[in-house]
Amino acid sequence: MVDYLIILFAVTLIYFASVERLTNYIRLISLQGLLLFGIAIFELKEINTANMLFIAAETLFIKTILVPYLLTRIIKRSGVTKVHRDAMPGFYLLILSISALLFSVILTQLMHNQYINSIFMAVALFTLFTGLLLIVTHRLIISHLIGFLVIENAVFLFSMAVGNRMPMLINIGILLDIFVGVLILVFFGLRLKPRTNELTMLKD
Amino acid sequence: MMAIILMIVTALVFPGIILRVRSLASGRKGPRLMQPMKEIAILLGKGSVFGDTTGIVFRIAPAISLSAILCSMLVLPFANQKPVISFDGDFIFFSFLLALGKFFSIIGALDTGSSFQGMGANREALFSMLIEPAFFILLATFAMFTGYTSFSGIFSHFNIAGDYYVLLFSILAVYIFVQIAVIENSRIPVDDPKTHLELTMIHEVMILDNSGFDKALIHIGSYLKFAIFGTLLYNIFATTGMSTFLHVVLFFLVQIVYAVIIGLVESFRARNKMDKNPKFILTILAIAWLAFVLILTMTSRLI
């Protein structure tokens, strides 16, 4: 079952390079949260209940519901619907995404040892590169935030690649990053929008 | 030989099923299943009209294109029987035969000297070029799974129920095969065979100058291609140990479900904008690449 979920997760990364609307980005982020919840449930068998509840809350509530809800509010208030304004066309982004997958597999092969789960490592690296690509190829700040959220999902998968452990401290740190990122954006999006025309643009 | 007979039978009703599904989905009764064949029969009874600017290439292109498709049917197996032609690497032969057919369609369109047909040929060539790697990656994954490089070897040793990872790969393979078939046959969402505006056409604009008998050959080739891709899908599901009767039932079941899926997609999905098509096709290629990399990693064949 975990294999189905991890492949579905990788397919969502391909669609990140393909879709053009912010609502689709948000749906993908939400779906990724749900998939990570499923992966965590099936993969983390030797974990205490408190930690498991924390992970369930993090993936199911925050990643799947709260963050997408906040992002949806931002795009409704800012009126920005497309991610590709002044960004690299999706065709080239897809080629970069395919290259990133190849590069991830090569890196996984170089790092391969008995303590690392190869498939988790390959998908985690692919997720990391996809997040970086989203940030460097887009100019909208909201796309950067989504890239940041994708990288955060990569960190979640990295922690699974090295075994059935999920240090609480890393989780809290990650959660704090998400909250700060999204809250700042909500603050800017909802408070300062009336005074600027293109708040969601990084520059111009 | 049985595979060829079954494919021809399927090709007779395949377009009719798609039309009927589209009609039912839009609340109409729709034409009879054999209506497209009646239209083909009418076209076959007519002579061809050739423009002054066309040459010999335009005249021979439909026949060569259909011949290439018919020859590609010879390598497809059925029910673990040996196909008419089988050798190592025959899937490359199959793929290049389809490409040869397409090549002649394209140069036939260019031979008319019409800018519209040149535009359609350009688009068709680009989309075929983009989807070709996905097909090869998919078959390379099959080859790596089974250790064989011929269709008969691959499909006789590929058992969908045999292994958990095989099942996982099969799901992705079916999805990718359906998408490749849609693109190869120029259907929605890549192209719309019902469109009447030349600027938005792809395949239809290429055959604007073809008429009568030649046009019938082109349509027959298109219907046979559907049956060919349906046969590839059937071979994914077919397992050893089934009787020939069950294989025939499974064959028609897969083909009918495949036609219904295409009919439903065409009913409920809008056509892509022209400039979005390369990205759509590249997404299919990326998923094929993902299937290749991840499933071979899971089965320790790659890492």
Image: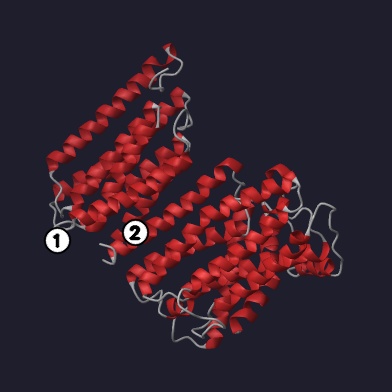
Which residue is at 37% across, 75% downward?
B146
Q: Using the image, name the chain to which the residue with label 1 belongs.
A: A
Does residue B194 show up?
A: no
Q: CA distance from mark 1 to mark 2?
A: 19 Å
Q: Secondary structure at mark 1?
A: loop
Q: Percent from the top left, x then y, of residue A167?
A: 13, 45
- Residue wearing tag 1: A114
The amino acid on which the numbered mark 2 sits, given as a three-letter code, is Val
Q: Give left or right: position of B121 versus B58.
A: left
Which residue is at 20% across, 47% downward?
A53
Q: Percent from the top left, x then y, of residue A137?
A: 39, 33
* Quadrant that contains the N terminus of chain A: bottom left
- Which sits in the foreground, B282 or A20? B282
- Which sits in the foreground, B18 or A201? A201
Q: Using the image, name the chain to which the residue with label 2 belongs.
A: B
- Residue wearing tag 2: B293
- Which sits in the foreground, B210 or A146? B210
Which residue is at 38% across, 45% downward?
A97
The amino acid on which the numbered mark 1 sits, given as a three-letter code, is Gln
* Quadrant that contains the C terminus of chain A: top left
What colouring does the structure picture have?
secondary structure
**Would you place residue A48 above or below residue B260 in this image?**
above
Q: Residue furthest top?
A: A195
Is label 1 on the same chain as label 2? no
Q: Percent from the top left, x then y, of residue A67?
A: 33, 35
Res. A153 image quadrant: top left
**Would you place residue A54 above or below residue B105 in this image?**
above
Q: Percent from the top left, x then y, of residue A166?
A: 15, 48
Q: Secondary structure at mark 2?
A: helix
Does residue A81 show up?
A: yes
